[in-house]
Image: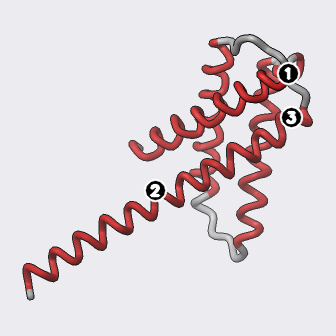
Amino acid sequence: MRKMLINILATTGVSIVALAVIATCYQASFLCIETVFQSFLANILIHIGIRCLNKIEFQYFIVEFILYISYTIIVVLICGKIFHWYSSTPIGVLIPLAVFVYLAGWCLRIFQVKQEIDDINVLLKRQKERRG
């Protein structure tokens, strides 16, 4: 649960930075605080859905990847409709933004798993030194 919360906060942070970059490109001078919470909710929904999808075993990685990206885009589009994001940000911007945030979250997860593997290897090495 702790890791999921950390991942949600990390992807929300990436989302907010990406939104700020997009807002700057559109000459916006501020980002509304409600957008931060809306982004946070969208990221919560995405992570819960992906966690549920993780319970399904896929034979091919590409199928899994396409399903996760599609789910992420669908959540962003639904949230966009609910929160009226389309009035300030076109769909053609939101979809690449969703893909970018998903890929950034995926990269963060890879680094997290690598760190966990390194930590386990250090522990195994210490255990071996104690026995040997």
Label 1 with label 3: CB-CB less than 8 Å: no
Mark 3 or mark 2, earlier in chain: 3
Amino acid carrying mark 3 in the image: Val
Please give the residue where the numbered disc 1 appears in the rendered image.
Answer: 26
Q: Quadrant of residue 59?
A: bottom right
Q: Disc 3 and disc 2: Cα gap in Å?
A: 28 Å
Amino acid carrying mark 1 in the image: Tyr
The residue under the point 91% across, 28% down is 90
Q: Disc 1 and disc 2: Cα gap in Å?
A: 34 Å
- Residue 15 in the image: x percent, y percent? 66, 33
Q: Is residue 92 left or right of residue 127?
A: right
Mark 1 or mark 2, earlier in chain: 1
Please give the residue where the numbered disc 2 appears in the rendered image.
Answer: 112
| Few, some or many residues within 10 Å of mark 2 (<14, 14–19, 20+) | some
The residue under the point 70% across, 33% down is 18
Q: Quadrant of residue 130?
A: bottom left
- Residue 100 in the image: x percent, y percent? 73, 46
The residue under the point 61% across, 20% down is 37
Please give the residue where the numbered disc 3 appears in the rendered image.
Answer: 93
The residue under the point 68% across, 12% down is 32
- Residue 131 in the image: x percent, y percent? 8, 84
Q: Quadrant of residue 19?
A: top right
Q: Is residue 5 left or right of residue 45?
A: left
* Quadrant of the frame with the C terminus: bottom left
Amino acid carrying mark 2 in the image: Gln
Local SS, label 1: loop
- Residue 21 in the image: x percent, y percent? 73, 29
Q: Disc 1 and disc 3: Cα gap in Å?
A: 11 Å
Mark 1 or mark 3, earlier in chain: 1
Number of disc labels: 3
